[in-house]
Amino acid sequence: MNKTATYTLITGANSGIGYATASNLVAQHKAVILVARNAEKLNMAREQLLLSYPMANILTEITDLGDSADIKQLFSSISQQKINLEGVVHCAGDMLEAPLMMSRDVQIDQQYQIHLKAALLLCQGASKLMLRKKCGSIVLVSSVVAEQGSSGQVVYASMKAAIKGLVTSLAQELGSYNIRVNALAPGVIATPLTAHFDDAKKQQLSQRTALKRLGEGEDIANVAAFLLSSQAAYITGQTIAVDGGLRL
């Protein structure tokens, strides 16, 4: 570990948008902390990145974001290692597809924990570390369904919609400390989260976008990397749609 380096923490980093974001940053010679709950998949992601970028500065932290104590332990570990944390991208999550009347309490609790409570605790832990340097950028991944809604995804959409309130309020709290907070609202992205969609559904969703295609993890990663960078130094409190014009 290079203690003089500035690190960006990425959740859900073993696949999908999280992995694409990690790859984007590593390609720019940025130091990253990959976070996921599956140790085997997390290590495979790290090894895959190192194959392409042998000199990359990549740390891993096995963390179950469904466990609040685990999230607090994550930041305790980062603090003990005296890591200079300047960026966070929260990509981890899963998508509950069920009518509200069929959604069980345990499923609602799980969606709340992974999408909203985890985001709150990640922001809390990260901002405490960023206050030391009075510099930082936090990027949370929301969803297009947070604003346009989606039948059969009421619970998921509700949790993602709450991210906007988190971002706009926390941006005001942390702005005077030069810590920026933003969110991305992806459309339908070709990741493991949507891998179960059949070809007909993918084609239908593609045709609903202005660009006539589904998004790729890299489409989201590019915007996340921009928001982390100094080029976005005057952008905070925003939820930016990256949906190929799905909402137009």
Image: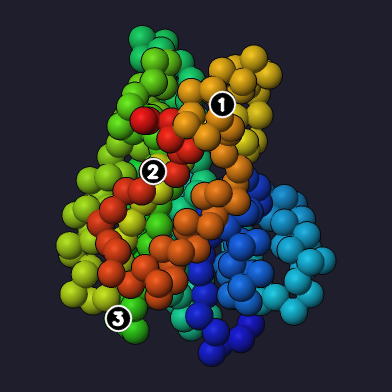
- Identified by mark 3, the residue type is Lys
Left or right: residue 177 versus residue 185 is: left
Question: What secondary structure is marked by label 1?
Answer: helix
Question: What secondary structure is marked by label 2?
Answer: strand
- Identified by mark 2, the residue type is Ala
Left or right: residue 201 versus residue 171 is: right
* Residue drawn 56% across the image and 30% down it: 212
Q: Which residue is mark 3?
A: 134
- Identified by mark 1, the residue type is Ser
* Residue drawn 39% across the image and 34% down it: 144
Check disc 3: other Cα within 10 Å, few if <14, some if 14-19, many if 20+: some
> How many numbered marks does the figure carry?
3
Alpha-carbon distance for marks 1 and 2?
16 Å
The location of residue 98, given as percent across then percent down, is 46, 16
Alpha-carbon distance for marks 3 and 1?
42 Å
* Residue drawn 27% across the image and 45% down it: 164
Q: Which residue is mark 2?
A: 241
**Quadrant placement of the C terminus:** top left
Alpha-carbon distance for marks 3 and 2?
28 Å
* Residue drawn 23% across the image and 61% down it: 171
Check disc 2: other Cα within 10 Å, few if <14, some if 14-19, many if 20+: some
Question: What secondary structure is marked by label 3?
Answer: loop
Of 38 and 206, which appears nearest the observer?
A: 206
Left or right: residue 32 versus residue 93 is: right
Eyeballing the image, is 131 above or below 98? below
Eyeballing the image, is 36 above or below 204? below
Res 59 visible:
no
The location of residue 71, given as percent across then percent down, is 45, 57
Q: Which circle marks residue 206 in the picture?
A: 1
Colouring scheme applied when the structure was drawn: rainbow
Which mark sits nearer the N-terminus, 1 or 2? 1
**Quadrant placement of the N terminus:** bottom right
